Amino acid sequence: MAARRGAVPGGRPAGRPGGRPGAHAPARTRVVWSPALLGYDFGVRHPMTPLRLDLTFRLAEQLGVLALPGVEVVGAEPADDALVATAHTPDYIAAVRLAGTQGVPDEARGLGTEDDPVFPGMHDAAARLVTGSVESALAVWRGQARHAVNLAGGMHHAMPDRASGFCVYNDAVAAIRAVLAEGATRVAYLDLDAHHGDGVERAFWDDPRVLTVSVHESGTTLFPGTGHPADIGGPQAQGSVVNVALPAGTSDAGWLRAVQSVALPVVRAFSPQLLVSQHGCDAHANDPLTNLAVSVDGLRAAALEVHDLAHDVAGGRWLALGGGGYAIVQVVPRIWTHLLAIAAHAPIDVATPVPQAWREHVEGTLGPPAPEVMGDGEAAGSPAPWSAGYDPGSPLDRSLLATRKHVFDWHGLDALYD
């Protein structure tokens, strides 16, 4: 990358003895899953229900995704305090442990709130997510796997000293810091959740080794109210923070235009050694907590773009995380099963029937009608490239141009034409 102004260092990724890290990584895909991960449970009325994971892995198993060649399914034990402390303060870790063992709320630290109610075993449940993401990141970095997926992870709102937005410990921060500690010098984090990835952004705000890109619904209409185009990083890392704030109601064409015209070129210019992505499903039109209108087909298309990007710029080194998503029957299991299949290099066609056994399980235990096919029937085609022109009358294009003007120059890109 030929970065202007020198804030984000350029050059090719630093290698390790014997070549670039992961250059000869096997085609194995590491998938983090065990029933123990269902312990991250805020209660029956909470949107962040572990049923999201249960239904996803039931669907993935019945479609044969978990049995694909090269797929390795692994569990995760709770991380020790030293590992959790790479992302959080000791006082906060102690408060989480107390909340989970004695039911003691600490609202100043976000524990015992409506968003983050206290539940038994809270520390161990959240610490498992940290282990899943850290061990996966290290496996990819060390060349033990080509891709890794931790759908239980992606807790991107958690702050160093408090819980926030259904997130207790920030596994993404811990995972990125683990590979930095092993010598990585350029890690890109791409957040596709409908909510701004504020916790990860804050952790690396002034760290030029980490590029954080968040494509989300504008903070003017959605929690956490942050992630504006002018937020571009601290004084030592100008341009290393990229925020794409989408207008409410953005659908497939606008969503993919945002990914393709801002996120992809910036990550390519940064030339990371490892790509970490967060795949919350709450940009979907049926999500009860957000105001975007993307389809399963559109979210699948974005995941395909991210997978190809990892191969293009990071030698295939890719860690994919879960995140939000609260339409737990109609949306989340299909999108995350698509993500697993993409990571296993066996994408599922959107016209594929949903297995009858899965549909019967859903309808027999939960009641709502289950989806019949793996897509929504939307045309998630490629939008016109930015180089073909932009519409100044479009709120979406105005938002994209604002982000491009704030950050593209830092990466040697032209905001109007690249």
Image: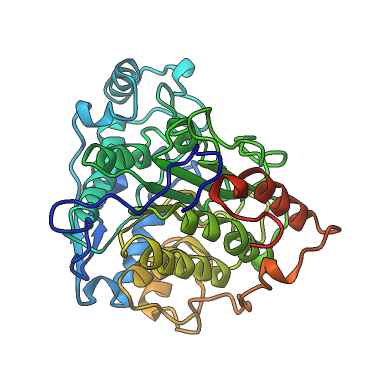
User: Which one is nearer the viewer's eye here, 312 or 158?
Assistant: 312
Q: Residue furthest right?
A: 393
Q: How many marks?
A: 0
Locate the C terminus and report the quarter of the image it occupies. Answer: bottom right
Q: Quadrant of residue 282?
A: bottom right
Q: Residue at x 64, y 35 (%)?
A: 225
Q: Is residue 273 above or below residue 313?
A: above
Colour style of the rendered protein structure? rainbow
Q: Residue at x 28, y 23 (%)?
A: 97
Q: Is residue 89 above or below residue 230?
A: above
Q: Quadrant of residue 41?
A: top left
Q: Is residue 180 above or below residue 257?
A: above
User: Which one is nearer the viewer's eye here, 173 or 341?
Assistant: 173
Q: Is residue 389 above or below residue 405?
A: below
Residue 215 appears in view: yes
Q: Residue at x 86, y 58 (%)?
A: 393
Task: Give the image location of residue 263, x and y in percent.
Answer: 55, 56
Q: Residue furthest left?
A: 18
Task: Give the image location of residue 376, x and y in percent.
Answer: 58, 75
User: Which one is nearer the viewer's eye here, 318 or 370?
Assistant: 318
Q: Residue at x 40, y 46 (%)?
A: 154
Q: Quadrant of residue 356?
A: bottom left
Residue 247 appears in view: no
Task: Give the image location of residue 67, x and y in percent.
Answer: 22, 74
In the image, 247: left or right of 202?
A: right
In the image, 83: left or right of 230?
A: left
Task: Give the image location of residue 397, x and y in percent.
Answer: 75, 57
